[in-house]
Image (spheres, rainbow, N blue to C red):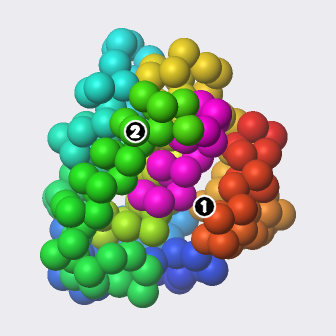
Amino acid sequence: MGLDLDYQDGQTPLDEDEKEGLIIKTISTRGELDEFEQYGVENAVMWLTKRKISSDKILTQDFVKILHKRMFGTIWKWAGEFRSSNKNIGVDKYLIPIELKNLLDDCRYWVENKTFSQDEIAVRVSHRMVLIHPFANGNGRHSRLYADTLVHNGFGQPYFSWGSRDLVKQGEARAIYLHALRCADMQEYEPLIIFARS
């Protein structure tokens, strides 16, 4: 029995070899996969709440990878590893380390120079991380938890609520989130900042 996935607007399809990286072989549907991945995300949140992590550590490629592995390491063998295939979104697979380094360097500059508000810095990082799309799966959830970690642990601000809804499933909250991302694509970040705090 293989993994049969239906993809919604904004979700990146997995290649067959990426599907082969599924650790729990009894998972066969999108619903089952979503449940296990949500459990992994919750475990990563628990792990984060027990740690003090400085913004210096957060703004490293190692932490970007560690966070993804913490979120999805019990589900996917390739969790925490940059994707090895090109997708319908994201930079070329060979450019991931370069583009991620540029993003983290930019973020350090924004923080040091107070270029934007702390919320806007975290939201800009989340948005750009999705555009880079460093991993085969879970990029949206990873980028939001990464932004939460930056805004809370790095800046000492409350976590974002991200609309207080499940953004994986189709619905009004996901539609608003995708619209806010499209606004951010055009350098209009206010809708995404508002959504992150809603």
Element carrying mark 2: helix
Is 124 situated left or right of 196 in this image? left
Query: Is residue 102 left or right of 31 when viewed as pictured?
Result: left
Circle 2/circle 1 CB separation < 8 Å: no
Q: Where is residue 113 shown, x and y percent of the image?
A: 48, 31
Q: Which residue is drawn at 38% across and 47% down?
A: 106
User: What's the residue at 22%, 45% (across, down)?
Assistant: 61
Instruction: Please indicate, yes or no, whether residue 81 appears anywhere in the rendered image.
Output: yes
Q: Name the mark on residue 109.
A: 2
Residue at image location 33% in from the left, 46% down from the top: 104
Residue drawn 51% across the image and 21% down it: 155
**Residue 43 appears in the picture as rendered:** no
Task: Provide residue 93's location: percent of width, then percent of height.
Answer: 22, 76
- Is the residue 59 above or below the residue 4 in the image? above
Q: Which amino acid does label 1 sit on?
A: Val
Q: What stretch is highlighted in magenta?
A: 116-129
Q: What's the amino acid at mark 2?
A: Tyr
- Give the image quarter of residue 28: bottom left
Q: Secondary structure beneath disc 1? A: loop
